[in-house]
Amino acid sequence: MFDLELAPRFSDQELEQLTVSEFAAWDGVEPDRHLVPADLDSWEPGPWLAAVLSSIDPARVNGHDIVTLMRAHSRQVAHDQAGYYRSIGEVATAVPTGDDGPPERSQEWYEYANMEVRAALTLTRRAADSNASHTIGYRSNRSCALRISLSAALRVRV
């Protein structure tokens, strides 16, 4: 949807600062409509997708592209939630240290991890417990799957 032939006229730094609306204006699209990149469904979630999604106003996207935009937001949310739960898991295994302490982890769950999560995120006890249980379930399923994979690999080699 973007006229990429315009790109060589600009430096990389200038291109990074252009918005979707500015690209749309060059393509002759009315300025009150936002364009969604044609290949948005193939974009991996992460910082680049988050930046593009934050620059698009859903109210200014046509009916066809809004579905593509919704799917992209869903991928980004799942990506961010995975990071959120991973962070909770790190809180649960982090060795309590001072501000400048090394990033040490324990094999055991930190006894007061739920309270740390609860205080840091201003959650109810139930919400903190629920978030921690999601993390514990993920980590135990992941380690279980890893053990199964390793035992299967060892059987193949023997």
Image (cartoon, rainbow, N blue to C red):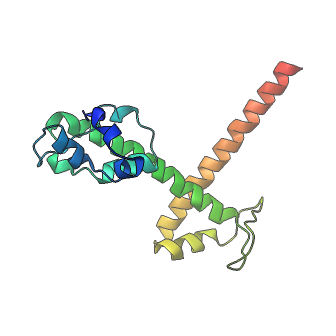
Quadrant of the rendered image containing residue 8: top left
User: As rendered, which of 69 and 110 lies closer to the eye?
Assistant: 69
- Is residue 78 found left or right of 101 in the rendered image? left
Quadrant of the rendered image containing residue 39: top left
Q: How many labels does the image show?
A: 0
The residue depicted at 64 percent of the width and 61 percent of the height is 90
User: As rendered, which of 126 and 131 lies closer to the eye?
Assistant: 131
Point out the image quarter for the N terminus. Answer: top left
User: As rendered, which of 136 and 77 lies closer to the eye?
Assistant: 77
The spot of residue 135 in percent (x, y) is 58, 54
Q: Which residue lies furthest to the bottom in this view?
A: 98
- Is residue 33 found left or right of 11 in the rendered image? left
Q: Which residue lies furthest to the front in this view?
A: 9
Point out the image quarter for the C terminus. Answer: top right
- Is residue 9 found left or right of 155 in the rendered image? left
83 relative to 124, above or below: above
Q: Residue furthest right?
A: 158
The residue depicted at 15 percent of the width and 37 percent of the height is 63
The spot of residue 72 in percent (x, y) is 35, 41
81 relative to 117, above or below: above
The spot of residue 43 in percent (x, y) is 41, 36
The residue depicted at 21 percent of the width and 48 percent of the height is 21
The spot of residue 142 in percent (x, y) is 66, 42
The residue depicted at 76 percent of the width and 61 percent of the height is 108
107 relative to 12, above or below: below
